[in-house]
């Protein structure tokens, strides 16, 4: 990033930007879809949001780091929890989301749908 990387605003938003898989840029590099953040009326930093499919990959990688191993190595109960978390974060609204998650979990699409249906059935109780 060009610009004041040590600015308090940049320091404050960097963990969030990293967690989203976004990119920090100098405000002069901002494009129409970027979000420019200002501090006391002065543009300080631009945030380039990732494409939704890239976000899903980033979320899956973060979940692997959190669990300390590939998601495919998790037990069934933990995989079900991962699917619930991903559903809450909108992972299945992304095109090919179910396929991407199934691949990361090492299960079939049917199994992911089964986990989702089980979760939705328990919400109805």
Image (tube, rainbow, N blue to C red):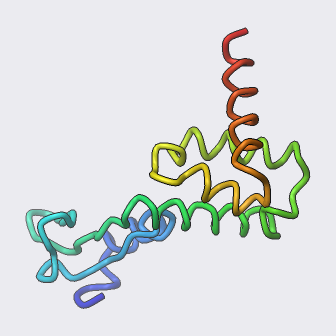
Q: Residue at x 45, y 52 (%)?
A: 95
Residue 102 image-quadrant placement? bottom right
Q: Along the horizontal axis of the image, is 103 left or right of 6?
A: right
Residue 29 x %, y %:
16, 82
Above or below residue 115? Residue 99 is: below
Can the viewer see residue 37 in this picture?
Answer: no
Q: Where does the C terminus fall, quadrant-wise? A: top right
Residue 12 x %, y %:
40, 66
Above or below residue 53? Residue 83 is: above
Q: Residue at x 87, y 64 (%)?
A: 73
Residue 110 x %, y %:
73, 42
Above or below residue 23? Residue 122 is: above
Q: How many numbered discs?
A: 0
Q: Residue at x 47, y 70 (%)?
A: 18
Above or below residue 92? Residue 1 is: below
Q: Nearer the viewer, residue 116 or 22?
A: 116
Q: Nearer the viewer, residue 102 or 42?
A: 102
Can the viewer see residue 43 in this picture?
Answer: yes
Q: Along the horizontal axis of the image, is 115 left or right of 23?
A: right
Q: Along the horizontal axis of the image, is 24 left or right of 117?
A: left
Which residue appears farthest toward the left when viewing the image? 41
Residue 76 x %, y %:
88, 46
Which residue appears farthest toward the bottom when viewing the image? 2
Q: Residue at x 21, y 63 (%)?
A: 35
Q: Where does the N terminus fall, quadrant-wise? A: bottom left
Which residue appears farthest toward the top when viewing the image? 125
């Amino acid at each position: 990033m060009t610009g004041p990387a040590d600015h308090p605003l940049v320091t404050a938003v960097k963990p969030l930007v990293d967690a989203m898989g976004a990119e920090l840029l100098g405000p002069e590099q901002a494009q129409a879809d970027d979000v420019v953040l200002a501090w006391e009326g002065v543009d300080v930093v631009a945030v380039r949001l990732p494409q939704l499919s890239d976000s899903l990959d980033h979320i899956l990688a973060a979940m692997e780091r959190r669990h300390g191993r590939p998601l495919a190595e998790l037990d069934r109960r933990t995989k079900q929890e991962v699917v619930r978390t991903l559903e809450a974060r909108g992972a299945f609204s992304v095109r090919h989301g179910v396929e991407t998650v199934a691949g990361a979990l090492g299960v079939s699409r049917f199994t992911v749908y089964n986990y989702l249906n089980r979760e939705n059935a328990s919400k109805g109780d």
